[in-house]
Amino acid sequence: MKPAASHTAEEERPFPSDHAGYGLFAFDAPFDSQSPELASGAGPDLDGSDRTNYTSATLSTPYSPSIATPNSYFGSIPAQLSHRHQANMGTPSQAPSTALRTASSRPPFAYLAPLEPTPSISTSPSALSIQPSLSKAETSDACQKGRSIRLEEAGIGTSDKQLYLDSFDQAVGEEDSPYPEVRASVSNTDDPDMPTLTFRMWFIGIILSTIRASFNFFFYLRWPSPWISEALVTVVAYPLGKALDSLLPIRSWTVPLCIPVVGGRSFSLNPGPFNIKEHALISIMSEAAMAPAYGMLMMIATEKDYGFSLGTGFSFLFLLSTEITGFSLAVIARKILVYPASMIWPTVLVQSALLNTLHAEEEKSSGKLSRPNNVVVNQLFGTVTGLGMGLVTFDWTQIGYIASPLVVPWWASVNIFMGFVFFYWVLGPILYYLDVWKIGHLPITGFFAYDRFGLPYDVTRVLTPDMQLNVTAYQDYSPVYLPISFVIAYSLSFMLIPAAIVYTIMYEGRTILDALRGKEVEKEDIHAKLMRHYPEVPNYYFLGLFLTFFPLLIGATKIKDLDVPIWSLFLAILLPTIFFVPFGYVFAKTGTDLGINLIAQLIPGAILPGRPFANMVLKTIAVESVTRSLLFLQNLKLGHYLKIPPRSAFTVQLVASIVAVAAQIAIKNIIFAAVPDLCEPDQPDHLICPGHTTFFSASIIWGLIGPARQFGNGSVYQFQVYALIIGALLPIPFWIWRRRYPRSILNYFNILVFLNGPTFAPPATGIHFTSFFIHAFVFQYLIRIKHQQWWSKYNYVLSSALHAGTGLSVIVIFLALQLPKDGRVSVNWWGNTVWTETADFVGVPYYNTDPEKGF
C-alpha cells in the first residue's frame, strides 16, 4: 500500500481558472467535479482527538490541543461549525456551494489524490463519505459522535480503522517544516474552501484599520504615549468576528444578470463560521495601517518649522504614492524572501501562533548602592543619560523595546548583545574618558546635537530668513558636535551600508541569481506546496502600481515646487531597490530590521547641498519605500503560513493603505486646527511631537549644513568616512572562515546583526539590552533546550499575550487616568522622585566646559 506516493500528479494539477477567492462578498466558488467529496456532498469529517495524539509520534514538535491546527481534516464540523450554521445547512448533499458550507467540509489537501485501494476499504465516492440518504438528524448526530461512527457508516470496519488513519496520516501528516519555530506555530494543512474576502472581513478590517491609524498617529504626537499593537488588534477582532457570525443572516442572494462581471452569481453576508483566514486578513489590514506614514513628519516640519502648509490634496497624493510605490518594489524579492522555508520571519510566527490559539476552540535592601551625584557611577549605571550597565527590569515595555526576546532567535540575540557590549560598554567609555573629539564635554548618552558650549545646538542661529544656511553665522557660532552615543551610531550605520551589500553578494548571491533566472531557490516545504492551490499575484500588478503611482509622485513634487529635481526622485527609488533585499534577509531570519535613514540623508545631502526640502522629500521616499516593501513581504509571509490566497492579501493591503493615509491626514488637520501650540516643548497636553523634532534637526544637519561640513576634509568627524571601507571588508574574513570550517561555532556570528544591534541606542540604553538578553537566554535557550514541548506550545503565544496585555493596560491607564488629568497623575513619594535628582537625569558630562569660550 502506497498512500502517499500517488498524489504527486494531483498536486501538480493547475488551479481552476475561475477560482475567484470568493470575491468581494464571498461569492460562491465553482464545484470541483473531480472531487468525490464534493460530488457526494460531504467528506468524511472525522474527530480530531486521535489525530492530535497520533501526530505526536510523527512530528518533532507536535501541536498541542491548546494550539490550533485550524485547517485540520479531522473534527472540522464539530469544532468549527456552530449549531446556528449547522441548523441552516440541511443535509450535506443539499449544500448550495462550498462557500456556504462549513469551512472545513472537504479535506485540507483539496488536490490530494484518493488513497490507493486496500482489500478491505472501498474506494467508491460514497464509501468515503456520509451517505446522501442520511436524514438531517442522522447527519447531525454523526457529526457529533465523531470519528468512529463515520468510519463505520463509511463501510470501514473496526479492524481497518487504524489502517485507514495510518494511510491518511502518511499522506498529510508526515511532511512539515524543517524548522522547529515554524512547526510550533504554523499548521501543515490547509482548507482551500475557507472563505476569505467576506463582508465581515471588510467591515471589521476597515473599521479597525481606521481606528488604529487614527489613534496611533495621535499617540505619535504625544510623549509619553501608548500604542495600539498588532496583537491587541488581533485579539479585539476575534469577538467582533464571532459577533457578526451570530448576527448576520445566513442566506444567499443572487446578483442580477444585468450587472457586469458578477451578474448571476450568488453571495452571502455570512458564509459559514468566522474562520482563521478572515481573521488573518483583518490583522494584515491593520498591520498595513499600524504606523503613521513617514512622510507625515515632513508635513509637520514644513508647517510648524518652515512656516507653510503643503495642503491636504498634496499630502494625500504624496503619502499614498510613496507607500504604494514601496509596495510595488516587493515584486523583486517575493521568490527569495517569502517562498523559501529558510526565510522564517520570526515576527510573523508570533502572529501565526496568536491566531491559531484564538481559533484553538475549533480544534528589599536597606543599604545604599551608590551616591546619586557620583558622575562616573551615574554615567556607567544610569538609565537616562548613562550606559545602564548591569541593570535589569521586568517591565515588558522596556524588555521588548528592541524586539521581543521570545521571538528573536537565540544566536541573533547573542550577536545583538555582543555588539552592544563591545561598542557601548568597552569602546565607548574608552573614547569618552580620553576625551576624543571633545566628547567628554557632552553627556555620555546624549539625545541631541550639541554646540561647542556643550548645549543643544540652536539651529535658528545659523538660518537666514528664507531658511538657508548663513555661513558666516555658522562659522561664528559652532560646528555640530555629537555625543559618543551618536558617534557610535553613525559609525555603525556607515559600516552597515557596504557590509550589507558585500554580505548579501557573498552569502546569498547565488540564490538571488537563481531567482532572477527563474530557477528554484530551495526545495519547497509543505507550506509552499499547499500554496500552489492559489493563483499568485502577477508581476504586472506590481508594475502597474509603479507606473501609476510613481508618476503621480513626480507630479506632486513638481506642482508644489519643492526644489526637487526629477532625476533625484529616480535616485530616491534606486536606494531602496538596492538595499531592501539585503535588509530583508536580516529581517526575515532574525526579526531585527536595518535602517536606511543614514544613506537616505547622506547621498541627497551630498548631491543637493543647502536644500533641506529636497533632502526631506528624497529621504521620505527612500525610507518609506523600504519600510513598505518589507511590511508587504512580511504580511505575504503571514498569508503564506496561514494559506491565504496571495491576491486576497495583496488587495487588503492596498485598501488598508488608502484608508490609513486618509484617516491620518484627517486627524492631522483636526489636531492642527484645534491645538495652536502643537509641538511646543511646554504643550500642556504633552503633544510635543518628539519624532518631528528629530526629523527637522536631520533636515538642517544633512540638508542645510550638509555632510561635507560634517564629515568632509577638516571636519571633526572626517574619520567616519573610513567606516565605509571598514564595513565593506568586515564580511570577507568571516565568509572565508565559514567556507574553511563549516562546523565552527563562529559560523553563528553574523556581522550584520552584530553591527546593527547597537544602533537601537540611542534612545535604547543598557537596561533595554541587558533585560532583552537575559529573557532571551531564559526562553530561547534554557526553556527551548530543556523544556522543548512547553516552548513549542507557549513561547510565541506568551510573547503575543505580553504585547497585547501591556498595550491594553497602557491605553486604559492613559484614557482613564492620564488624559482626564492632563497627564499629571502621579504618586509623590521618594522612590518616584529621587532619580530626578541624580547626575544621570541631568546629564552631567565628565569634563567641564568654559561657558564663554567653549571647547
Image (spheres, grey):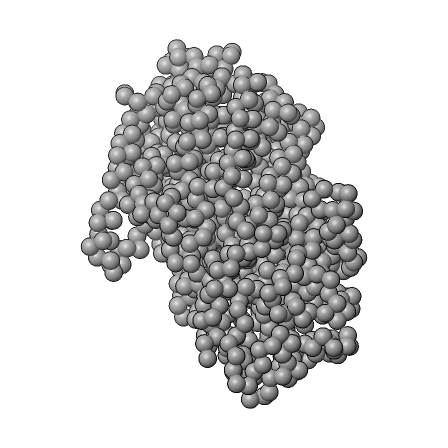
Q: Quadrant of residue 580?
A: top left
Q: Residue at x 54, y 16 (%)?
A: 561
Query: Furthest-bottom residue in view?
Result: 159
Q: Residue furthest left?
A: 740
Rendered residue at 77%/74% (across/down): 136
Q: Position of residue 330 (x, y in %)?
A: 48, 41
Residue 759 in percent (x, y) is at: 39, 41
Nearest the eye: 632 or 255:
255
Q: Is residue 279 above or below residue 58?
A: above
Assign the C terminus to one quadrant of the image: top left
Q: Position of residue 498 (x, y in %)?
A: 31, 37
The percent position of residue 96, horizontal first and vertical second, equals: 73, 62
Task: Tell me, yes or no, if residue 853 can be seen here.
Answer: yes
Q: Quadrant of residue 308?
A: top right
Q: Is residue 137 above or below residue 641?
A: below
Tell me the residue at 29%/29% (across/down). Answer: 721
- Front-lying residue, 332 or 235: 332
Please identify the quarter of the rendering in which residue 314 is found. top right
Q: Looking at the picture, tell me which residue is in the foreground, 367 or 526.
A: 526
Which residue lies at the image location 52% right of the left edge and 49% below the top edge? 536
In this view, the residue in front, 789 or 15, is: 15
- Does 326 sit left or right of 478 as displayed? right
